[in-house]
Image (cartoon, rainbow, N blue to C red):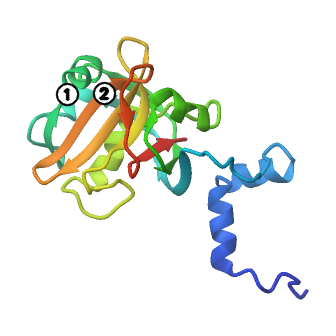
Amino acid sequence: MKNKYHDITNGQNIAIYTKLGGPSGVKRFLANELVVQEPPPNRRLKYHDSVECPKIDRFVAKDNFGRSTVNGVKFCDFNENFKKLFFSKVETSVAETILRSHDLLKYSKGLGILREIEDGKEITNLAHLHRLLTLQGNGGKGILLTNGYANIFYIVGVDGNLWAVSARWYDDGWYLSAVSVEGSYAWGAGGQVFSR
């Protein structure tokens, strides 16, 4: 059978498949449960890329974060909120997922960013953030930015609240911080936001 859409390349088909979220997204699209539409003109986020993260049975933060190189990841420091809210965190039965990165297009506060992420997809896991850090333990190429701009993840702290967790690469290692999603802190354009 001849393809009547001969002007679409295999690479473009793969990109569409990825942007829809893989097999489950394609099925949702074909069942009219997922709709593709033009973005609103004042968007804060633009889809950039995606990465598969494996299932993790148990993640103990205190064993994976420290002020040196820990399990292959070079850290330079952590802000006080991150230490207080995440160092004692333990995550169990973290499901396999696809994390999507979005370019942050303009200066934005946490709640404005969260409004643009699909409901139910905004919360990520500390274990998956750490997994991405292990892939770029000494900076280098990968899905995470290593130019000093923020890689932002929305993660629940030990206090039960949702926090914006930022990972930034500096010459002396990864700097992790946590800020309130409801606070006045605004993220600069050029960073990226992760969601499921």
Q: Is residue 29 above or below residue 167?
A: below
Q: Is residue 164 above or below residue 168?
A: above
Say if residue 60 shows up in the picture: no
Q: Quadrant of the N terminus?
A: bottom right
N-term mark: 1 or 2:
1
Q: Is residue 115 above or below residue 7?
A: above
> Label 2 neighbourhood size at 10 Å, few (<14), some (14-19), many (20+)?
many
Q: On the rendered structure, is 96 left or right of 65?
A: right
What type is the residue that disc 1 sits on?
Asn
Q: Can you name the residue that lies furthest to the top here?
A: 159
Q: CA distance from mark 1 to mark 2?
A: 7 Å
**SS at mark 1?**
loop
Residue 170, percent across and down? 17, 50
> Label 1 neighbourhood size at 10 Å, few (<14), some (14-19), many (20+)?
few
**SS at mark 2?**
strand
Q: Residue at x 35, y 49 (%)?
A: 132
Q: Residue at x 88, y 84 (%)?
A: 4
Q: Residue at x 50, y 50 (%)?
A: 102
Residue 96, percent across and down? 51, 42
Q: On the rendered structure, is 132 left or right of 168?
A: right
The residue that mark 1 highlights is: 79
**Are dots 1 and 2 in contact, CB under 8 Å?**
yes
Nearest to the observer: residue 32 or residue 98: 32
Tag of residue 178: 2
Nearest to the observer: residue 186 or residue 17: 186
Q: Quadrant of the C terminus?
A: top right
What type is the residue that disc 2 sits on?
Ala
Q: How many marks?
A: 2
Tag of residue 3: none
